[in-house]
Amino acid sequence: MWRLLLGSGLVLALGCGSPPSAPPRAARPDLAASLLLLAEQSLEAGHLEAAEDRFARALEADPGSAAARVGLGRVALARGDLAGAAAHFERALERAPGAADARLGLAKVAGRQGHAAEARAHLDQALALDPWRAETHAEFAALTGPAPRAPAGSLDEALRRANAHPYDLRAGLVAAAGLAQAGRSAEAARRLESLLWLSDLDPGAARSAWGLLTRVDPAYRDARIVRVHSFADQTIRARPGWEFRLRLAWLGASRALGPLLGVRFLPMTMRGFESSAASASLGELHAAFRAQFATRTPKRGVLALFTERPPSRSLPGDSLGQAEFLGRRLAVRLEPAPEPGPNRVLLHELLHLYGGVHVADDVESLMNPSGGGRVLDPMNARIVRELRTRRFGTDLDADVLDRIDLEATTRAYEDALRANLALRRAGLSAALELATTSRLEARRLAAGVRELDPHLADVARFVSALLWRGERRASAAFLLETASRLYGPATPRGKKAAAEAERIWDEILTGTGDGKKG
């Protein structure tokens, strides 16, 4: 809907009577949007005069813009002009009653004025409008702080403390334990569940909360926890509330994938690392992380790197995310202005850790790397269900292979190949069939693979391990040869896969072998 901006008319001396009014100027929301983007960049850089000028010009281009009003309020707040900031935030709410960022601004004003109750009321409303805004949670946590550590005299007192200090896990755990003891299991479960996304704030209390939750709520008794350790580079840490941003990302992942995987992701570590000396490629970001934490990474759990640095222009195909296939490491590029709810890139990379494979570009699926779908295709759903009991340590056998149904998992991957949902570009579906009847023809097809694709190589190598365990050695050797070509025959991983394949073929031809694959 277009709004009209009335300009000042020229008074023409044409005799008596009222001067004609100038024609109204149409609002320019497109221009306002561009100016808002520039204003945000100026504000982030600390250039308050430029930010104020651009927010004011955006408001002139679109007088109904609540975002421009909020921006002017943020500039005033940065200058310490509390009255001016409050006026802008209130005008923004008049235009857009659902503007959560205006509520957050009023909360900051009230907090700086020492009006804690008023600040909390604004924060309650801001979270009701947008529960996924990290900065609001950070402001709320700073306002409420920890609860007193003296024992609560009653359940009512424990509940009052937990409500007054909602980010204190210990206070929430005490209240939930009291509810459970009083037979109010449903209330206890809801309170315990609400604490888990804050696990890194008090890991001991989080572990106790999970244990109590599995006792009071049958729905959690068969679920598993996956500890995650998050490492954020300087681009993430530059934004207020970055820890809450990552906690919310893991909360979204738990809600999206929990029903399928039967897991709850618990953020147990929030640490920073420096990536400014590295290029923006995910490979170099991983290298920078390893250089800083080579001997200080947890031995168990998912290791997740986060950055806001965009993909490298010098590396065609540099992606938004990266994960070890059935490993424990992943990297995700977050957008500067995150959308509410689960992050698709994070979900995609997590599914790789559970054995998920890429699908064709025309398939609507989380595993379509070029798509936007948020559902999982049936073949990948079947694969990750077979692998959901995996652990996250440092040994593939102990973490994965020893914990799965070998026959069911092998069938799931073979069906994915034959359905042309996974290794279709390498022609492996047909070759996998030929490996059981014509070894020479299968090797010929494997040798014809020319397109490098390390992801498909990882999948082929894992399926070869499944086939080896199922005593299908020819098929295992064929897939290793294919993996070598997909990695690149001259790469270290390509050479290793080729050597393993050659050894298996030698054993098949000579009838030797100790039953173990390297």
Image (spheres, rainbow, N blue to C red):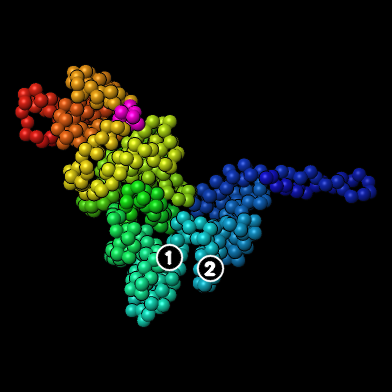
Q: Which mark is residue 467?
A: none
Q: In this view, does 48 lie to the left or right of 362?
A: right
Give the magenta range: 417-424
User: Quick one: quadrant of the N terminus?
Assistant: top right
**Residue found at x 76% / y 45%:** 24
Q: What element carries label 2?
A: helix
Where is residue 375? Give x, y as percent.
42, 41
Where is residue 174? Give x, y as percent.
34, 72
Q: Which of 484 and 212 is in front in this view?
A: 212
Q: Which of 442 and 184 is in front in this view?
A: 184
Residue that mark 1 sits on: 141
Q: In this view, does 113 lie to the left or right of 161?
A: right
Distance from the alpha carbon under mark 1 to that under mark 2: 14 Å
Name the residue furthest bottom.
Answer: 153
**Residue found at x 12% / y 25%:** 505
Residue that mark 2 sits on: 121
Magenta region, main secondary structure = loop
Query: Is residue 272 highlighted in magenta?
Result: no
Residue density around tag 1, few if under 14, some if 14–19, many if 20 or more, within 10 Å: some
Residue density around tag 2, few if under 14, some if 14–19, many if 20 or more, within 10 Å: some
498, above or below 218, in the image: above
**Quick check: can you spot residue 476?**
yes
Query: Is residue 422 highlighted in magenta?
Result: yes
Q: Is mark 1 on a helix, strand or loop?
A: helix
Instruction: State which mark lies toward you, 1 or 2.
Output: 2
**1 or 2: tag closer to the N-terminus:** 2
